[in-house]
Image: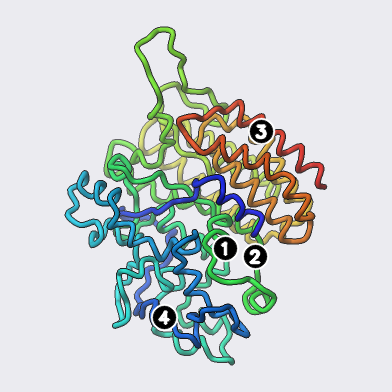
Amino acid sequence: MGFALSWLRITAIASVFAAFGIEPAVSAAPVDRAVHQGVASCAGSTCHGRQEATGPRVRQNEVISWSDPASLTGVHSRAWKVLNEPRAQAIGRRLGIANVATSRECISCHGDPAPVRGPKWQQSDGVGCEACHGGSDRWLASHASVNASHADNVAKGMWAVNDPAVRASVCLDCHFGSDKPGQFVFHRIMAAGHPRVAFELDLFTSLQRHHDEDADYAARKGVAGGVKTWAVGQALAVERALSLLPAASARVTGPDYYFYDCRSCHRTFSDDPAAQIVARTNGWRPIPPGQPVWNDEQMIMLAAAARIAAPDVARSFDSQSRAFHTALGGDRAGALKAAAALKATAATLARRFAGTSFDRAQTFALIDAVLIGNAAAYTDYQGGAQAVMAADTLLSALVTAGQVDRGAAMSLRPDLDRAYAQARDANRWDPAAFRATLAQVAGRVRGLK
């Protein structure tokens, strides 16, 4: 994913550390009841703690990569440390939390919410190995055996994060929210200063990868590929949001404002009669002026993916999306019924994508669907940010698969950089200019076919 990695120089869209708490829902990663032994149990020089990538089977320098203080590969190791920084402390004061570094509302995502902890486990490890791979007490010793297979490890409790659906369920727990205690960023927490939460599974995976997916890895575990990971991640992000809606809406008169597009309410306004109204009509969501807008950035991406990879389901998804937006302006029962229908279709799409081998033609068609087919939907900042991340991810997948020359793809970098710059600041969002840039990118991509 080296092509996508160059994006780091021009934007900070993915600098996300999600956290905090909600009541029951479904679809999260399973509750982990195994003992978490801590990063130190993985960090020996004969395991994953080598200073150089010289291991014969795995590179064995994964802990060094995970703990890198200077790049995004080390953000998980720094997740707890940021709770001691001024911004986090200020958020805590506004929320009445005495110490955010020990509060379950914070450490459930900024650390490893291990229910059972071994003697080497440390809170200061942040999001350690077992937060993503599962508690290791049953598989820690055996997984290093030359005779052990990945299936053996999974059977003993290791989470199969090589599977995009499993990986999405684990990542979404913190990078969107879950039903587990302390894993949801309520609007009150965002109002206190927490960053907006955003997520794109394949791009985030590539930016935070701690290991190589080489030929040996592919033989043992398989490699899903960037397009499949992107598509499954988009579908399960929609499914997750709709799964959390019933519990969140039970607490207030409607869904918690966390679910809405921030800019649908936080707009510039003035008593001057000559001031321009900044709310924008969007045919993607048939709602009246003044109604808060559900944050549908993943829905927009999922609609594009469905049109290419599951056209028989795409029409139902589009109609259910429109019905859901409409229902949010009505009674709670109607909104929850519409959400349940849309959630089921999103789950269906996730399964379909998981069984799809995305070829070169489909990937080009997906890029075109995102950049051109969805253009009218990019009236708001969140959708635009997803669109440019998708274009980068899908183009990177073509390069990684050897289906597009890397040098030719790099010639698009200035256009992509311009799109990223236009999606950097929500307060300067210009949808017309952004759509024009996407059209230029689309034209350049077509030239690569």
Q: Which mark is residue 259?
A: none
Compare marks 3 and 4 and give the one earlier in the sequence.
4
In terms of depth relative to the viewer, which is nearer, 337 or 309?
309
Could you tell whether 21 is left or right of 58 in the image? left
Would you place residue 100 above or below residue 112 in this image? above
Considering only vertical position in the picture, is 16 above or below 225?
Answer: above
* Element type at mark 3: helix
Give the residue drawn at x 60%, y 58%.
229
Q: Would residue 70 be found to the left or right of residue 312 on screen?
A: left
Q: Are marks 2 and 1 in contact (CB under 8 Å)?
A: yes
Task: Measure how far apart labels 3 and 2 are at the Cα level.
Answer: 30 Å
At label 1, the amino acid type is: Pro
Distance from label 2 to label 1 (Cα)? 7 Å
**Could you tell which of marks 3 and 2 lies nearer the N-terminus?**
2
Q: Read off the residue under disc 1.
A: 164
> Which circle marks residue 224 in the picture?
2
Q: Amino acid at mark 4?
A: Ser
Question: Does the residue at mark 3 contact the one at mark 1 (Cβ under 8 Å)?
Answer: no
Q: Which residue is mark 3?
A: 437
